[in-house]
Image (spheres, rainbow, N blue to C red):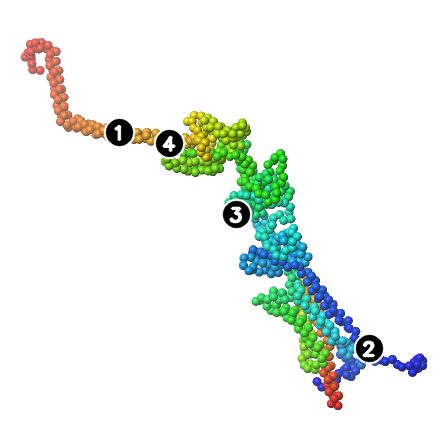
Amino acid sequence: MPDTEKFSNVPEAKAVPKKRTRLSLVWVIPIVAAVAGVWIAVTKILEKGPEITITFSTGDGLEANKTKIVYDGLTIGTLTSIRLAEDHTHVIATAAMSPKTEKFLVKDLKFWVVKPRISGLNVSGLGTLISGYYIGVQLGQSKEGERSFTALESPPVGGDVPGRFFELQTKELGSLGEGTPIYFRQIQAGQVVSYELDKGGANLNVKIFIQSPYDQFVTPDTRFWNASGVDLSLTAAGLNVHTESVMSILAGGIAFETPTSDSPLPPAPADATFTLFDDRTEAFRPPPADPHTYLLVFKQSVRGLSVGAPVEIGGIQIGEVTAIQAQFDATTKEFSVPVTISVDPARFGVKFLNFPKSEDRAANHKRIMDALVARGLRAGLKTGNLISGSLFVAINFFPDEPPASIDWSQDPVQLPTKSGQLEAVEDSVAGLIKNLNKTVTNLDMTVSSVRGTLTNADKLLTSSDKLMGNANNLIAPDSALNAELNNMLQQGGDAAQALRVLLDYLERHPEALIRGKTGEAKP
Amino acid sequence: MSANNPIAMEHGLQSCHGCGLLSRPAPGAEEGRCPRCDEELVFRKPRSLERTMAYLIAAAVCYVPANLLPVLTTNTSGGSESDTIMQGVVLLWSPTGWPLSLIVLFASIMIPSAKIVALLYLVFTVKRGSIQNNAQRVRLYRMVEIIGRWSMVDVFVDTFTVSLIQLQPLMSVEPGPGLFFFAAVVVLTMMAVESFDPRLIWDSASAKEIKREVQHA
């Protein structure tokens, strides 16, 4: 090394031990671990969605950390705690929602518990038998955010399905229930959502949902009727069976139809109220335009006549019985049955209504009714059904009836009545029985006199019997009479012998008559 | 301990980790190899305390999510359910299943944490140059070394369950994120145990003895 020797006087650099301050690579491991931990923690915190509270009426089937909130098959939240409300009447559940669900949480968001439900023939939520209940969600339309909700008792109907809700009023629920199908031309067009009594308790308000496009066929003129069961009618054409569907026979149903008219009405607004009729016939019966109410007073029994029984003229129903009472007339001390009927003149047809316009309507009506009664119009009861004995009111003309008139001062106006055929039969049967009774009484008397006669005859016979006995005694072989008779006959015989001897002698000696016996008197 | 016990390092000798052969370090070379088994020869494990400390910190960091995150997710047709280790312990706790529950509690929760604490204690005492309870500390180290691997049982059982219970679509079991962190805890603590050189426990004691001998002399 020549250079080193050459520069031997050059000072040598200070040897400094290399400081080993550089961090060992091993520290990467805790840093990685820390980064991973922090990253997980951050994502966990970021993943934490909004927290909401849902109020349930019952905590049945709900479990904290188990029960899911499911929308369209996706879990969007889980119940984290369930506690009883302060007043112990309901259950408040807290739920942790998935992240990014904030915009769903609006005011009209609906929650309900999905559990197995069997209503009518609708079975739903069977899967929850295995998986446990979960909470269903229906999204709302509102823009207003909300964090506390009240769960529905039952799943909302309709939901995202377009359609409209209507209300039906009925007196009786019948076989209707939640989920009862509603048919339009025998297609299921909707269902019953809920029902509730109105405030007075007199009517039931049934809320129904008609899905689109059937809802456009519901106009203000639409008729709804109860299509449960089978409609049987026996006509001259034969037996008619009418039903909506097999399902409606089993589970009940409602049908609706809109009368065809020249100018179709616009669809009814949502939540419009309709009447639920009992059957199709009733639904399509035109509403009485100007019903006339009359009073019929019957003296006979009206057993078999019921409210709603038809009032017929010539076999066509023109009205119905609206009330049946019993009354006691204090002055005549008689019971009678006033029956109120309501007659719809619209059913009489055009001719009846076609009166001169100038005339007063009421006066015209009076005039016509007076004329009809004068011609013999009478109301009577007729048997509609021989088996059930149901009666109906038949209005007919009986020109032979004693004349009657209408007292227009009464309200309602009383129409003259005529005993029905049944009453007449009853009367004649009663008369017959009365006569029969008399006859029987007479017969009785006859019989008793015959009996007296017979007793006398009996006596007579007895005495004649005695007589015969006596006679018998008289003619007995050992009777004195017999002996005497025998004697008498013997003597008679003897007498005859003597006579014969005499005659013989006389024959031979005719002269003896004159000369008498001559010597030879000894035979 | 007597100063008469010869310590290889004091005499400039290296003992082989692999076969225990004593040898003189190669002159001038940065590293030497065992002439018998070709193992790398060092006086002490390099940066033992630092590496142990790093592994321990990593293990402690992983220990938190390992216990907070679910280790198993059970999917049934009724829904899925995720359970953490502690939930598993609670689930197993029953009049008949309590021994199992205790095993899980010990193997999965107490042992990893005990390992971390024990190693931290060893690292700190060595760093401080403590000469107390040397024999106890070595026993502790050995216990940690022996017991530590059993924590892997939990990971083992879980992976077994996951691979066996795949009855799609009825039921399936999936590992949760907690399981990876738990496995990391076990592996990291084992690496910490491995990187800790127990001879360091004695080094400070011999150093002090040397110092005392020098003073006496």
Question: Which of the two discs, 4 and 1, sits closer to the camera?
Answer: 4
Residue at (63% x, 39% y) in the render: A266
B86 lies above or below A269 = below
Q: Amino acid at mark 2?
A: Lys
Which of disc 4 and disc 2 is earlier in sequence?
A: 2
Q: Amino acid at mark 1?
A: Ser
Asked if badges 3 and 4 are on one and the same chain, I answer yes
Q: Nearer the viewer, residue A269 or A456?
A: A269
Query: Which secondary structure, mark 1?
Result: helix
Please tell me in which quadrant of the rendered image residue A151 appears. Answer: bottom right
Which of disc 4 and disc 3 is earlier in sequence?
A: 3
Q: Given contact means CB atoms under 8 Å apart, are the residues at marks 3 and 1 in contact?
A: no
Residue, disc 4: A430
Query: Which secondary structure, mark 3?
Result: loop
Q: Amino acid at mark 4?
A: Ala
Q: Chain of mark 2?
A: A
The percent position of residue A360, horizontal first and vertical second, equals 51, 29
Which of disc 1 and disc 4 is earlier in sequence?
A: 4
Residue B184 visible? The answer is: yes
Q: Chain of mark 1?
A: A
Residue, disc 2: A18
The percent position of residue A66, horizontal first and vertical second, equals 61, 59
Q: Given contact means CB atoms under 8 Å apart, are the residues at marks 2 and 4 in contact?
A: no
Residue, disc 1: A449
What is the spatial separation of the Cα atoms under label 2 and label 1, in whole angstroms?
Answer: 168 Å
Question: Which of the two discs, 2 and 3, sits closer to the camera?
Answer: 3
Which of disc 3 and disc 2 is earlier in sequence?
A: 2
Residue, disc 3: A199
